[in-house]
Image (cartoon, grey):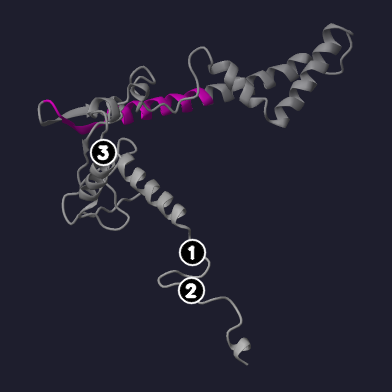
């Protein structure tokens, strides 16, 4: 009975759990590694942690503060974006044609329709029967004339619609926005097409946005209602 009562693993030593009892050498090795890690941790890490803690102070959950790392000119005004489209990255252009590409592009778009391809096939057969085989039951003028007239009329309609889009683009690009001038500390008028990446704009109440903007501050209550 006494042997059964004392069978099993011996009771753990004072302050040591079963299975984690280490030798004195391993304990000394762990203590040395911990001390070495404390010596190797740079002082800048503590400073950066303190800086992050001070910056995050006062922010609600989900909010963050963005800082420029190398100065305003390098981060807020990227030249790689502002040099696009001839230095006007916000220039709006919805037109399809130029004076040189108007007729080729219009004809290319028209021949995407199956009906125009069918009439072109008929016109080729009539021309072949008239000028090559010298036999055609139809007069080539009665087939080619109306077909060319329809194509040219549609091309003129496309040109008119493109001119209207060009007019609307000009009006949109010449609209005025209020841009903050950091050097003069004033607001100045700029056209929408002259807005650059990194500009700070003042949008009045019920005003339109000249570009994709990042909301920095509102007039009151720190809320804004946007209608799209």
The residue lying toward the viewer, choosing from 180 and 93, is 180
Q: Which residue is mark 3?
A: 44
Residue under the point 36% across and 44% down: 37
Residue 100 falls inside the magenta stretch: no
Residue under the point 33% across and 23% down: 82
Q: Which residue is mark 2?
A: 12
Depicted 41 relative to depicted 134: above or below: below
Q: Main secondary structure of the magenta part?
A: helix
Q: Magenta span covers which residues?
A: 158-183
Q: Is residue 117 left or right of residue 12?
A: right
Residue 21 is tagged as 1
Front: mark 3 or 2: 2
Residue 198 is tagged as none
Residue 162 falls inside the magenta stretch: yes
Q: The N terminus is located in which quarter?
A: bottom right
Mark 3–mark 2 Cα distance, whole angstroms, equals 44 Å
């Amino acid at each position: 009975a006494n042997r059964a009562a004392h069978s099993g693993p011996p009771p753990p030593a004072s302050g040591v759990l079963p299975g984690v009892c280490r030798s004195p050498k391993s304990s000394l090795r762990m203590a040395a590694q911990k001390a070495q890690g404390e010596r190797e941790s740079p002082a800048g890490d503590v400073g950066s942690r303190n800086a992050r803690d001070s910056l995050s102070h006062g922010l609600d959950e989900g909010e963050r503060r963005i800082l420029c790392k190398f100065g305003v000119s390098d981060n807020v005004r990227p030249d790689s974006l502002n040099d696009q489209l001839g230095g006007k990255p916000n220039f709006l252009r919805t037109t399809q044609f130029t004076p040189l590409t108007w007729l080729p592009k219009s004809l290319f778009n028209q021949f995407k329709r199956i009906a125009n391809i069918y009439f072109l096939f008929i016109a080729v057969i009539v021309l072949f029967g008239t000028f090559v085989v010298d036999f055609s039951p139809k007069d080539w003028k009665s087939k080619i004339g109306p077909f060319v007239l329809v194509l040219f009329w549609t091309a003129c309609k496309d040109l008119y619609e493109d001119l209207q889009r060009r007019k609307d683009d000009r009006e949109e690009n010449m609209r005025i926005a209020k841009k903050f001038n950091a050097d003069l500390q004033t607001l100045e008028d700029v056209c929408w097409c002259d807005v650059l990446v990194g500009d700070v704009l003042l949008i009045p109440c019920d005003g339109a946005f000249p570009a994709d903007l990042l909301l920095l501050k509102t007039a009151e209550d720190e809320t804004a209602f946007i209608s799209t």
